[in-house]
Amino acid sequence: MIVVFWSVFLYLVPVQLMRVEAWLGWSLLKLPGQSVVAYSLFALAGSLGLWSGVIMAVAGRGTPLPLDTARELVVRGPYAWVRNPMAITGLTQGAAVGIFFGSGLVVIYCVLGGLVWQIFVRPIEEADLAARFGRPYGAYRSQVACWIPRRSAYVAETPSVPPD
């Protein structure tokens, strides 16, 4: 599935946007160190995405895909710092592609993708998580931001067990 995601959102769409830029006669941005910055961002984001996927599979007993979603609430790994590291991964990798090619339209496409995710996808995802995980998700959501990582890892409250 990741190959389909990368093929469409990180290759096909950016290529089409760069063709639009060429058709409009817009020049591409060329800055010193541009490719190093782009490669670094792409690799760092990719590492975050892989780490997030492994944690989702192991701790959540599922995948990020809606058809095989996590069966357990995941608040470990990168999820202990930010609520949706997978969205951050995709958007950062898209921006890295735009930076690499010097394409302003590709970077704008990533910003718009983040807005679409924030306005349309996030509310649906969070309603589903609230319905499935209830109070533990509410506590997690109130303490872990969606986009800005915490300074320290979130630790879920453990229910107190009455003494025997």
Image (cartoon, rainbow, N blue to C red):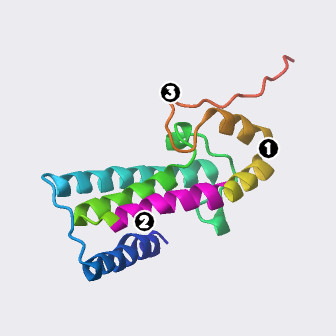
Residue 117 magenta-highlighted: yes
Q: Which image quarter holds the C terminus?
A: top right
Q: Secondary structure at mark 3?
A: loop
Give the SS element for disc 1.
helix
Q: Relative to 102, is 53 on the left or the right?
A: right
Query: Is residue 90 depicted above or below 22 in this figure?
Result: above
Q: Quick one: SS at disc 2?
A: helix
Please tell me which residue is depicted at 21% across the width and 67% down the height of the picture: 28
Region in magenta = 105-122
* Magenta stretch: includes residue 30: no
Within 10 Å of disc 1 (Cα), the crowding (few <14, some 14-19, many 20+) is few
Residue 90 visible? The answer is no
Residue identified by numbered label 3: 152
Q: CA distance from mark 1 to mark 2?
A: 34 Å
What's the residue type where badge 3 is placed?
Ser
Q: Residues within 10 Å of mark 2 (few under 14, many from 20)?
A: many
Q: The disc labelled 1 sits on which kind of residue?
A: Gly
Q: Position of residue 74 (x, y in %)?
A: 62, 45
Question: Which of marks 2 and 3 precedes in the sequence?
Answer: 2
Prevailing secondary structure class for the magenta stretch in the rendered image: helix
Mark 1 to mark 3: distance in Å?
23 Å
Residue 109's disc number:
2
Give the residue at x 60% y 47%. 59
Apparent side of residue 20 relative to residue 65 in the rendered image (left or right):
left
Q: Which residue corresponds to mark 1?
A: 134
Kindly identify the amino acid type of the residue bearing the numbered disc 2.
Tyr
